[in-house]
Amino acid sequence: MEENLDCSASNLLCSENASSCFDDDLDFNAIKEFGVSPDCDHHLKNQIFNQQDPFFINNRSTYLMGSSGFAIQSDDRIKEMVEKEVEHLPEDDYLKRLRSGDLDLSVRKEALDWIWKASAYYGFGPLSLCLSINYLDRFLSVYDIPRGKTWTVQLLAVACLSIAAKMEETKVPLSVDLQVGEPKFVFEAKTIYRMEVLVLSTLKWKMQVITPCSFIDYFMSKICNDQYPSSMSISRSLQLILSTIKGIDFLEFRPSEIAAAMAISVSGDMQTLSIDKAVSSFAFVGKVKNNK
């Protein structure tokens, strides 16, 4: 692929004429049975929702993001979510491999930097960012990105954000239009579609996932004596979650644990409740984890 690319150019159109190079580097041959629809984005969105986990049916927004205005989940439902969240995590050795250099940490950083810029450009919500990071980490934990192929990082980032936007946003740009910020490589819709299908198939179509955002309303309500938390406290919690999960240290913890810690941090800043009382409200998170 690199021999055919002018990497000094500010923009490079990666067309379907280079499909054999994509196939060789990313094993697109494995997903050829899906074909390419004339309306790739709409077709793929339908495919994704046809693969729904029954756990999320009719409850997508409530399960994934209570702060969108839905009722706070019950204790029993939260316990179910804590048990379910382990299905949506990267492989156990992922963090170790990032820290040891076995996996190139710069690949993750480069992808997330672009995802942040594109999300800000389109005004995507925090859940789209959380989902994008989840997809990226899960994919990198099981799929070897070829070293030295810088275009693969950008293509993966575009695919992860495109899928996340299809899952969460009401106004979804075309996948080709996500490529903002003067990217070095510009991919055609069919190439992005194929990468999206590769990500989906690699992650076994488990795209409705539980993230720290899924729990924040519940934990903040516990801090507020079971009253619905203020929009300001929710916003501060979500921003803190996003700044935390952009790094790799959070990978040691489950989404529910991250959300609980962020809620405690925000509550401490606002001096609304003692830390001891807050921790006691979240005790069952550790109990469920230890029972697994």
Image: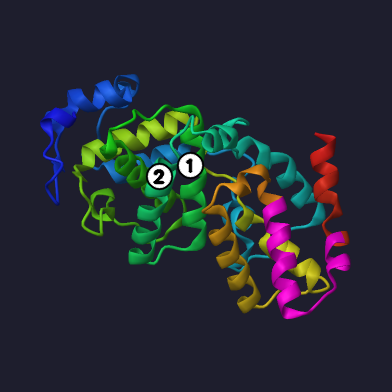
Closest to the observer, 131 or 21: 21
* Residue 239 sits inside the magenta stretch: no
Q: Is residue 270 visible?
A: yes
Q: Nearer the viewer, residue 66 or 269?
A: 269
Q: How is the image coloured?
A: rainbow
Residue at image position (21%, 43%) is 187
Q: Which residue is mark 1?
A: 135
Say which amino acid is labelled 2: Cys
- Identify which residue is drawn at 49% across, 29% down: 102
In the displayed structure, would residue 200 be above or below residue 56? above
Q: Quadrant of residue 36?
A: top left
Q: Is residue 210 visible?
A: no
Residue where numbered disc 2 is placed: 160
The dominant secondary structure in magenta is helix
| Foreground of the two, 253 or 52 | 253
Q: Give the position of the N terminus as an image quadrant.
A: top left
Left/right placement of residue 125 relative to residue 182 reads right
What kind of element bears circle 1?
helix
Identify the element where label 2 is drawn: helix
Looking at the image, is 159 positioned above or below residue 118? above
The percent coordinates of residue 46 (x first, y second) are 39, 42
Residue 143 screen position, x and y as percent? 44, 27
Mark 2 or mark 1, earlier in chain:
1
Of the residues shown, which amino acid type is indicated by label 1?
A: Tyr
Quadrant location of the C terminus in the rendered image: top right
Is the C-beta separation of discs 2 and 1 under 8 Å?
Answer: yes
Q: What are the residue bounds of the magenta stretch?
A: 257-279
